[in-house]
Amino acid sequence: MSRLESLISAMTLPEKLGQLTMTTGGYAVTGPARVEDPSGAIIAGTIGNLLNVVGTDDVFKMQRLAVEESRLRVPLLIGFDVIHGHRTLFPVPLAETALFDAATWALSAREAAIEASADGVAMTFAPMLDVSRDPRWGRSVEGPGEDPWLAARFAEAKVRGFQGADLAARDALAAVAKHFCAYGPVTAGRDYASVDISERTVHEVHLPAFAAAVAAGVAAVMPAFNDLAGVPMTANAALLRNWLRGHLRFDGVIVSDYNAIGELIHHGVAADLTEAAALALNAGVDIDMMANAYRQGLPSAVDRGLVSVAQIDASVRRVLLLKERLGLFEDPYRRGATSQAAATLAQRRALARAIGGRAIVMLKNGSSVLPLADSIRRLCVMGPLADAPAEMGGPWPGAADADAHVSVLAGLAASLPGVEVLHARGVAIDGESMADVGAAVELCAHADAVVLCLGEAAAMSGEAASRTELGLPGKQRAFAEAVLDRARALAKPVIALLFSGRPLIVPWLVEKADAVLACWFLGSEAGNAIADVVTGRISPSGRTPVTWARTAGQIPLFFGQRPSGRPADPKDRFTSKYLDAPNEPLFPFGHGLTYGNFTLSNLRVAPQQVRESESIEVRVDVTNDGARAAEETVFLFTHDTLASISRELLELKGFGKIALEPRQKGTVTLILPATELRFLGIDLASVFEPGEVEILVGPCADRLQLLKSRVHLLI
Ligand code: GLC
């Protein structure tokens, strides 16, 4: 009999339920806090997993109770939210997606895994794969944007990065694909609210990233808090047991979200913890995070015949198998106590700086005010996010020292030694006082250029941070307009830096500022990364992974819309449009300016007729007509113009990058396997239909900017 089977057969029911329980160690508060000292339960074997324990001392202390004092000596599984870095923070996921670079997405996850495992962590509750098309929802910041194909590429990269080649390695983290599924379209963008979307949208938009994560070998999956059409995801047997475990053959661990099993009572589908526990276990959930429902509810569920001991054993087996794959039985202390050489930390900070610079999306650069002119001698750096290092980490700060993040002010001062940098906050991030605006505005008169740092606090996005107003909080707009008016009167350029976990609705700022950079939350090296772009040390290259609406009334606004029977026509009243706003966004998906000036030409697609087993080669020439070197990103979209169901006007199928010197020309080649043109037919079964498909290539999801060709699919 194997070690695991021997263990299972030796376990009492409370010990088995201990392996299905995860409780917090209190290092961070990531849910309705209920922190009790787990020490006694660990020794009793009735808690087998912990979250929010960080640091070798604490991890080893808890691990020692399990492996040296408990009866069966089963090691603890310890998880933490390593979302975008651990002690060194990289840009928040939405920002990092803007790199459109899977290798770098994997690299930053690998570096985060090295740091977190050195702190004794063995599991990260990441990657978050929720496709989001509603920026009112604060958790958009944690995910890979609005597109399912992109989310799938992000999923693959992050799973491979976190887990590495061998899950038993001391620097490997078990990744958790979350939140399964369709959490992004919560009603009205309100976190935790109900979700009611079509089954087609669930399969076309919200499941592909999880299929990709499973294909990449993800160790675990976390169901979402929301109900989906009335069925809470934590109890959704159709999607958890039948689709995830059945159709995808996922045999890893399913860990509930924080207290989510207990919240089945609030959902109104369970009368008590017994029923809640039975629903979750029957749906396939293995670990109960923070609800204590399995320990309290499953014994009576067994007595009442709602679940069987065999089902409990199956879950215990999956948990023990994961611990074994992580090498925890061999060496429970494998993760932790690995010192990080100073040079390694410096390299990681340099990587965070480089990724930060590439995550910046230059939304506007009117009259090329950027990069800053060499003639500038006095620079005014203003606004509530100018000297705010702690905000730069975003809403999932990991185990980083927030005060050690580099602020915009510090980064610019360090990068411009010969320039006098003036600073004024002007207003708070959120608040009513305008008392300091006058003095701040007057500083403009003493500067050659103004950098205006505006946006959200880190806590204004992320979990439990939905907003109905998507402009600048507090009195920032009034302050910014006073600065912009004064600067214009003095003919001083204004560069606006936007810090946010979502695309903000700021058309007035885009109109009035000379340049606008989306700086999201860039992590530990934020200020240096921003300085690298603003000073021209590097060219911006980030492309927005979400559409920027012009007005909140357009939401949800995303490029993958279907054509409708009455496509917008400004000359025809009876077509799909608004009376009071355009259909077009402020900035489309993929938008992002560089210091180059790129033109695309000569799109070639071959072969023109293709069978499913073949691939399509797409080639396009790119020329940099600008005066500076830069990197261009080219997107490949398709549009199936005639099919058994109405198909999206644009479907993202690939992207390529090319770095070009001034006046240099190159070619981007993209290979599209024809099988990628399969879609879900009328009965949601995957089909490959003959007929014509448009191939569209260009700098963003604006059809007017895309070069177009077509292929003919043959059966
Ligand atoms: C939180 C979040 C989830 C996180 C978990 C553990 O409520 O929903 O994303 O991983 O609890 O902190």
Image (cartoon, rainbow, N blue to C red):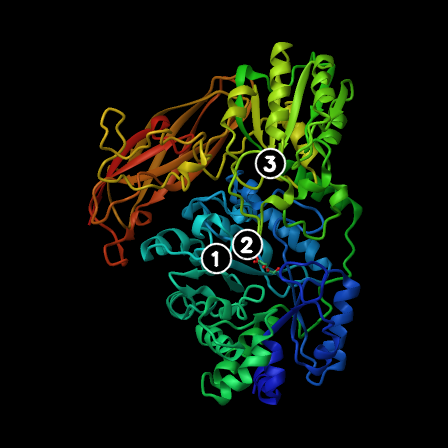
Of badges 1 and 2, the one in the foreground is: 2
Of badges 1 and 3, the one in the foreground is: 3
What kind of residue is marked 1?
Answer: Ala
Q: How far from the left and from the top, in percent, is residue 54?
A: 73, 60
Of badges 3 and 2, the one in the foreground is: 3
- Label 1 Cα crowd, 10 Å radius (few <14 / some 14-19 / many 20+): many
Callout 3 secondary element = loop
Residue 691 falls in which quadrant of the image?
Answer: top left
Q: Is residue 133 left or right of residue 638?
A: right
What kind of residue is marked 2?
Answer: Pro
Q: Is mark 2 within 8 Å of ligand 1?
A: no
- Let me know if residue 197 appears in the view: yes
Residue 178 versus residue 331 in the image, above or below: above
Mark 1 or mark 3, earlier in chain: 1
Mark 3 or mark 2, earlier in chain: 2
Q: Which residue corresponds to mark 2?
A: 127
User: What is the C-alpha distance between the residues marked 1 and 3?
Assistant: 36 Å
Of the numbered discs in the image, which one, if any, rests on residue 577?
none
Task: Say if mark 3 contacts mark 2, CB within 8 Å.
Answer: no
Q: Which residue corresponds to mark 3?
A: 473
Q: Is residue 245 left or right of residue 107?
A: left
- Label 2 Cα crowd, 10 Å radius (few <14 / some 14-19 / many 20+): many
- Let me know if residue 309 appears in the view: no
Q: List the single residue furthest toward the top.
A: 490
Task: Say if mark 1 contacts mark 3, CB within 8 Å.
Answer: no
User: What residue sits 73% from the left and 59% below the top?
Assistant: 119
User: What residue sits 72% from the left and 36% below the top?
Assistant: 388
- Give the camera-side residue of 371 and 481: 481
Residue 533 versus residue 112 in the image, above or below: above
Q: Which residue corresponds to mark 1?
A: 213
Callout 2 secondary element = loop
Q: How far from the left and from the top, in percent, is residue 128?
A: 53, 53
